[in-house]
Amino acid sequence: MLAVRSLESADEVRDMPHGHLDALNIEGLEFGRAQFEPGWRWSQDVGPIAGTGSCQFHHNGFVAEGHLHIRMDDGTEADLGPGDVFVCDPGHDAWVVGDETAVVFDFGGEMTRYAKPAK
């Protein structure tokens, strides 16, 4: 099998305060490209949309540009920057560090539900 999709033909294009998401499904893989502007914070910009106290999605990600800080609900924290690959379980907050837009690619499998009301 060979499957190819362009983010230019994303299944979903979603804007949120201080951010933007392009999500697509390709042969069972949910993939997303998120652009988080300076000032973006999950708890302030996505939390009210999701209706949860912290992000409840698993992420397998790659930071292409910018810097993020992630704080897990248990207090574990990490700084991420360009070139970092990360795995993050549900139960976290995240925010942009600095004045550069963070561009993150996510292979976590849940991006078509990200930044939508929890069901």
Image: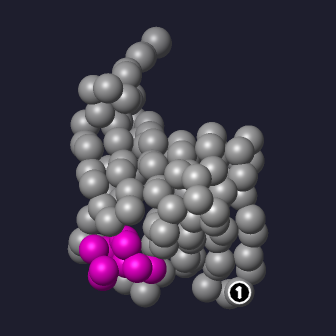
Q: Is 64 in front, or is 62?
A: 64
User: Magenta includes 12?
Assistant: no
Figure check: 64 above or below 93: above
Q: Is 4 in front, or is 104?
A: 104
The C terminus sits in image quarter? bottom left
- Determine which quarter of the picture holds residue 45: bottom left
Rendered residue at 47%/57% (across/down) = 37
Label 1 packing within 10 angstroms: few (<14), some (14-19), many (20+) = few
Q: Is residue 78 visible?
A: yes
Q: Is residue 39 left or right of residue 97?
A: left
Figure check: 83 above or below 2: below
Q: Is residue 89 visible?
A: no
Rendered residue at 56%/69% (across/down) = 95
- Determine which quarter of the picture holds residue 13: top left
Image spot of residue 93 (x, y percent): 55, 76
Image spot of residue 16 (x, y percent): 30, 61
Image spot of residue 69 (x, y percent): 66, 68
Residue indicated by mark 1: 75
- Determine which quarter of the picture holds residue 64: top right
Q: Amino acid at mark 1?
A: Gly
Rendered residue at 46%/67% (across/down) = 40
Q: Main secondary structure of the magenta part?
A: helix
Image spot of residue 29 (x, y percent): 44, 37
| Segment colored magenta | 43-51
Element type at mark 1:
loop
